[in-house]
Image (spheres, rainbow, N blue to C red):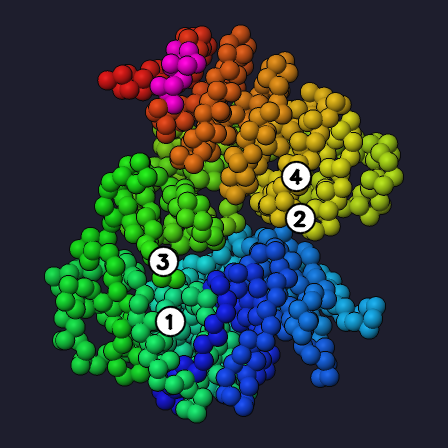
Amino acid sequence: MAHQVHFQLSAQLVGHEKEVRAVLALSDQLLVTGSRDETLKVWKYWEETKQWKLESSFQVHNGFISCLAALRINQSCFPLVLSGGGDAIIRAIDIMSGSQVGKGEGHSNTVCDIQMGEASQFISCSWDCTSIVWNWREEEEGGNGIGIRMFPLITLRGHKASVWSAVILSCDRFQTASADKTIKLWNERGECLETLYGHQDVVRCLYKVPNADGRIVSVSNDGCAIGWKSVEQRHWEIEYRLFLSNHFLYCLTYLSSLKLFVTGGEDGSVIIFSFEHGVVQTISHPKTIWALTSLPEKEDLVTGCMDSVCRIFTRDESRKADDVLLQSFHESAGTKKLSASMVQGVDWDKLPLYEQVIDTPGTREGELKVVRKGNEAQVLIWSQQKWNKFGDVVDNPQENSGQSGYLDGEYYDYIFDVDIGDDQPKRKLGYRKGENPLAAAQRFLFKEDLPLEYIDQVADFIDKNTDYRQSNMYMEGDPFTGNSRYIPVGDNRDKNIAMRDPFTENRYRPSSNDDSQSTAVTQHFPCSEFIYFGHSDQFANMRKKLSEFNHQVNEDIRLSDEEWTLSDKLISQLEQESHIANCIFTEEELQTMEKLLDWPTENIIPVLDIFRLMILSPSASSHFFLKKDNFGLDKVKKHLLSPKATIGVVILSCRVICNMFSTRLVALLACDQWEGIDSLFDSSICVSHAKSIEAYSALLHNYGIQLSKGGEDFIATTHQWMTRALEWLKLLSEKQDFSSIYVVWTALGTIFVSHPRLLQKAMEEYALLDIMERHIQTSGKIKECIKRLENLIAQIEL
């Protein structure tokens, strides 16, 4: 049966303004779609007209929608829908009215998958590296309305990167798939029973095969599908492995009557396959496929695409689209723009002619072939026993890299034309040799006002089309996220904490070695390392002071017995976790810290000490500074501005802001807020205490390193920072804190390497040479920094 499968386009559901990230079939006549445009849309099929129509559209999330699932209360009630997305909240929606009837809060970052279990269980997973098993129940509310209460039962912690997919195997067994390239098996107590290794890249989707106990299928960014089987209650092994694509695979569904799987991914291909027969049909789309499902009875296939369209495909000739729509779809599917690297390189002189290939049968379904047609290189795909156009190779087939030149007044070693679709003109992406791909990708996305969720794809393109890997293997850590260790300056700094970037999955973190480390010490700058305050031996005192102050504060902000237990649990996790970045906090623990941050300034010191450690965890940092609309920084500002702020409050506030740089997006937020933060600190007060000198110097250092990566968009802020850094060095001239003086000089040197004209301005307007003269005899490392600056100045004068 498999070789006779032939899906054709049936309908296109057009209405979303941005890509369709989630599709849900409630029946053969009712579909729900979710999009990056933050809306849910309900579509209904009308038998009378044989057409799908948009029934309703509503917005319930404060962010993009990434997943949908159906709650079926009983046969007499309309099904409710669970949706999750960028605001980290699971929402229960009455799709008849568009109203929210319940919400589940427990994740601290994007919810990317929700799967239902039996009875009243469901499971969710998130970019916060966790998965949560939930229970839910229906409750009557006022006016006979339906209310849904969701209760987190188990939080599954153990993955080292985002959890992309999860399934409920039984009431006491669960599986999760992660960007750390593993699949984990869990029990009802949240204990990891087994870790499955099989994929070579991010595992994006799991599917529990229906009516086949002990079998699951996974797909990955490595382009493979793997069939797993349970051979014992606690052990799984690979039964099948099938390579499907040279591109990332993002989604997976199953057609029960055909016993076929369907996957879709980055290159816009929907691949229908079985492990026994291989690929049986490939359906090319105009852009990336984000979501798949099928109609329950008819088993028509439903796709969600990056071009903002939801499409339905059928095997029933009576439901296929008319010839005009079919022709339009096939033409649009062949308009994809592909770089030569995406099709494994192109040698123009060796390309076969289109005329030589078009009548020659392909060897397998889904085979791609690059041909020369006139002066263009085209990609053809063998599908349904004929060659169809898959896309055009848009870069020079003889040269995959962009040309060098000037863009927006800046010189770049590579300038690429980027097609962002939607019939918009191509955008220019500039890249400098040696620059981290993430930094260039972030600059491009900000400039073009594109979502940061594409940072991986853009950076991956840069990585493939430049000599980044070869020219940067000496680098230690990721200069965009601030390296992977603490700078060992003073007893308050932890050398060994491993920082993780939950958004990029550490894809661009080159390996480190001792040789590269010694080179960095000799060179001093440009510097890529941030300074964090991650060590403490004061946990006993923290508990003691919290207990003492808890009896002093007003009753409305005093911790209850339950909250006190949560705070103690929170501190214990910080105390026991050798790598604080791995800490994951529950929603209740985070809420307890929010309450503590509202304590009076005279009682806030132990709270700030705990807080600066917590935010070294990316999930906590994202919660307090991104999800909570900058809640954490607002609280720090409030205490610094209080007339009761002591030097201890100043020191700990500096340390909190330094630790903000441990999470990439929070570091960008800190830079955006430089002017407001800078005004909070009085240099004459900071210079009065050894610990405040250390902390404020570290703060200036971190800002300098981050601003050096910001390009022209941050030039005004960089100039303000430079002014403050030079003033601070003047104040430190009589101090013997050489470590603090050194970290400021390394940051200044890094800025001057990135912005030579600021070096000229520092000499002309701020007497830089005089400041250098004051410090050149202070220590060997500082002297080396100043000598390096003298060389830079000599180059400018030449």
Most distant residue in the left direction:
349
Asked if residue 29 shows in the view, the reply is yes
Q: CA distance from mark 4 to mark 2?
A: 16 Å
Mark 2 residue element: loop
Q: Earlier in the sequence, mark 2 or mark 1?
A: 1
Mark 1 residue element: loop
Q: CA distance from mark 3 to mark 2?
A: 43 Å
Q: Residues within 10 Å of mark 3 (few under 14, many from 20)?
A: few
Which region shows up in magenta?
758-769
Q: Residues within 10 Å of mark 2 (few under 14, many from 20)?
A: many
CB contact under 8 Å: marks 2 and 1: no
Q: CA distance from mark 3 to mark 1?
A: 18 Å
Which label number is shown at residue 632?
Answer: 4
Judging by the rendered image, the residue that carries numbered circle 1 is 285
CB contact under 8 Å: marks 1 and 4: no
Q: Nearer the viewer, mark 2 or mark 1?
A: 1
Quarter holding the N terminus is: bottom left
Asked if residue 236 shows in the view, the reply is no
Question: Looking at this view, is 658 or 60 the one in front?
Answer: 60
Judging by the rendered image, the residue that carries numbered circle 2 is 585
